[in-house]
Image (tube, rainbow, N blue to C red):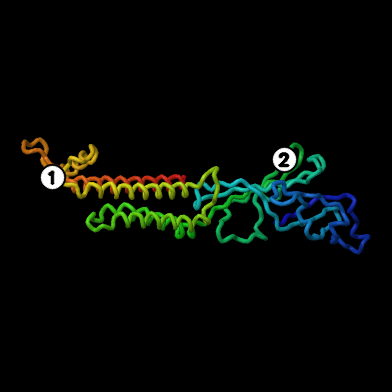
Amino acid sequence: MGTTLTWKDPSLVWDPASYGNITLTTLDSINIWTPLIFLLNSAENLKTIGSDAKFPCTVYYTGMVVHPPGGIISAKCPTDFSKFPFDTQTCTLIIIPWGMSSSQVTLTSVYSKAQLGFYTPHADWTLLERKTSTGLADGNYSAFYLNMKFQRQSLYFNILIIIPTLLFASLNPLVFVLPVDSGERVSLAMTILLSYVIFLTLVSGSIPATSNPMCALLLIMIVIISISGLIVIGTIYSAKYYYLHADEHMGFLPKLFAKHFLLRTGKIVPNVDGPELVITGKDASRALDTVFFFFTYFAIIICVICYFIYVSS
């Protein structure tokens, strides 16, 4: 970060006509008075900005002094990763002349926005705002504020995390389309569940590990894993009834779902006298497959829609 400090020192005024028409000169900053400015929210030890190197001062015959201290500094700012990877982060740098009250040194901002002469764009972040302002900090210190707002470039995380998550979520309920006779339904459901768990383990290093607030994407991934577990249970539960020949061992819900399934498919007609309908295990299994298929897809779609509404708000 580079800064430019200007002030007027009456002790450094001279008449150019008396000194060969010299209107300015360059002096070492240790030979004249310079204000000690500090970054108040520094992430490292508190030290003067520019203390790592010597920055010369330009002195004009009017007593005006220009001092450009700078350096590579680290600041600590609050973060909010709840909308990762579509998040924006705000950071305010607070610079004060430590040990000197506002009656002795007053900081003013020449520009309403920070100048980008020494700014290098970052591959992962886009600078949206760079406002400057002045005020009082910690009671009676004159302070300079640099308010910056950054937006994350989300393309890499979309390809690495979001698209595979949506793909796993869309594949999960398809196990209920696979015939029970194939004998591969449970193994397919378990394979998808374990694959997603391994995928989550691999990408966990790319997801911010914060609890307050927690990343919404991580919550969605946990919900999808939970739905995958329910799909495994539903697959086993549905297969349990497939090979039953009568409804004597069925519970109330499988019978109810089976009757509605047969009514909707037109295999039975309501309010028609005749022999009592015998519901087979295959009827119950098909009905449960339909319920689980639409219920899980509905839950996944609702979760995904809620996530994108949240991150776009």
- Identify the residue at image location x=54%, y=53%: 151
- Identify the residue at image location x=51%, y=45%: 214
Q: Secondary structure at mark 1?
A: loop
Please identify the residue farthest to the left as the structure is shown.
274
Q: Which residue is mark 1?
A: 266
- Classify residue 83 as left or right of residue 242: right
- Identify the residue at image location x=59%, y=60%: 122
At label 2, which amino acid type do we have?
Ala
The numbered mark, 2 or 1, whose residue comes first in the sequence reads 2
Residue 121: give x, y in percent of width and height. Answer: 60, 60
Q: Which mark is residue 137?
A: 2
| Quadrant of the frame with the N terminus | bottom right
> For this rendering, which residue is in front, 51 or 220?
220
> For this rendering, which residue is in front, 25 or 42?
42
C-alpha span from label 2 to label 1: 77 Å
At label 1, which amino acid type do we have?
Gly
Q: On screen, 31 above or below 238?
A: below
Badge 2 crowding class, 10 Å Cα cut-off, few under 14, some 14 to 19, many 20 or more, is: some
Residue 119: give x, y in percent of width and height. Answer: 64, 59
- Classify residue 91 as left or right of residue 188: right
Q: Nearer the viewer, mark 2 or mark 1?
A: 1
Residue 234: give x, y in percent of width and height. Answer: 30, 47
Q: Secondary structure at mark 2?
A: strand
Q: On screen, 43 above or below 160?
A: above
Residue 267 found in image quarter: top left
Residue 49: give x, y in percent of width and height. Answer: 76, 53
